Amino acid sequence: MKITIRPTPRQVLGRALFIAAFACAVALLPAAVAMALSGRWRPLVLLALAAGVLAFAIALAYWSSRRAGVVLDEHGIHPIVQPAVSPKADRYAHWTRVGDIRAERRRGRTVPVVYLLDDAQQPWRLRAPYSGRGMAADPELDEKIFVMRSLWETYKSGRPPRRTFRA
């Protein structure tokens, strides 16, 4: 049994739009200043449109829903991330090492945070699921955290739950 939790398509689109807008603003600032000083604005509009489309395409490809999230199974919590993208790609929390799972506010978002029993490690803030403002809202966040907590409660003893069948 594996449960995969990823950002919603709406969250991926919102993140890509945010990254594209920021990249366009940074990339076009020198061109805008130069064109404002020369008084020619028409090339700037075309340049901004082309840069916006390119930045959005790159951001959408980078922030695809396949790069962020977690997999929950009977062993623990595994991140969905390629090792080349993140140095914490090998991070894994067995259910017996989890001390608590809480929903916390971080930078305008509500994210699940996994507290491990090892005091040496910092709390693990999961990249997905999360909920925030605007397009980052996830109406199912509470249900996803409930599933995570339920699996933790089930498997935290290290043994699968006993099954009793009566005929």
Image (cartoon, rainbow, N blue to C red):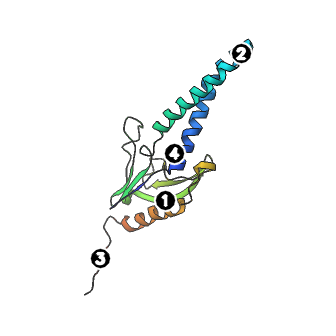
Q: Is residue 4 above or below residue 30?
A: below
The numbered mark at residue 12 is 4
Seen at 27% across and 82% down, the residue is: 165
How many C-alpha atoms fall within 10 Å of the one at disc 3: few (<14), some, or many (≥20)?
few
Spot occupied by residue 106 in the image (x, y as percentages of width and height): 59, 48
- Which residue lies under the disc numbered 3? 163
How many C-alpha atoms fall within 10 Å of the one at disc 1: few (<14), some, or many (≥20)?
some
Based on the displayed image, in which of its 4 quarters is residue 52 positioned? top right
Distance from the alpha carbon under mark 1 to that under mark 3: 26 Å
The amino acid type, in three-letter code, at marker 2 is Arg
Q: Earlier in the sequence, mark 4 or mark 1?
A: 4
Distance from the alpha carbon under mark 4 to that under mark 2: 36 Å
- Which residue lies under the disc numbered 2? 40
Q: Earlier in the sequence, mark 1 or mark 3?
A: 1
Seen at 57% across and 55% down, the residue is: 104
Tell me whether the residue at label 3 lies in contact with that at label 4, contact meaning CB atoms closer than 8 angstroms: no
Q: Residue 29: tell me if it is visible.
A: no
Q: Nearer the viewer, mark 2 or mark 3?
A: 2
Q: Earlier in the sequence, mark 2 or mark 3?
A: 2
Tell me whether the residue at label 4 lies in contact with that at label 1, contact meaning CB atoms closer than 8 angstroms: no
Q: Nearer the viewer, mark 3 or mark 4?
A: 4
- Kind of element beneath mark 4: helix
- Which residue lies under the disc numbered 1? 101
Q: Quadrant of the C terminus?
A: bottom left
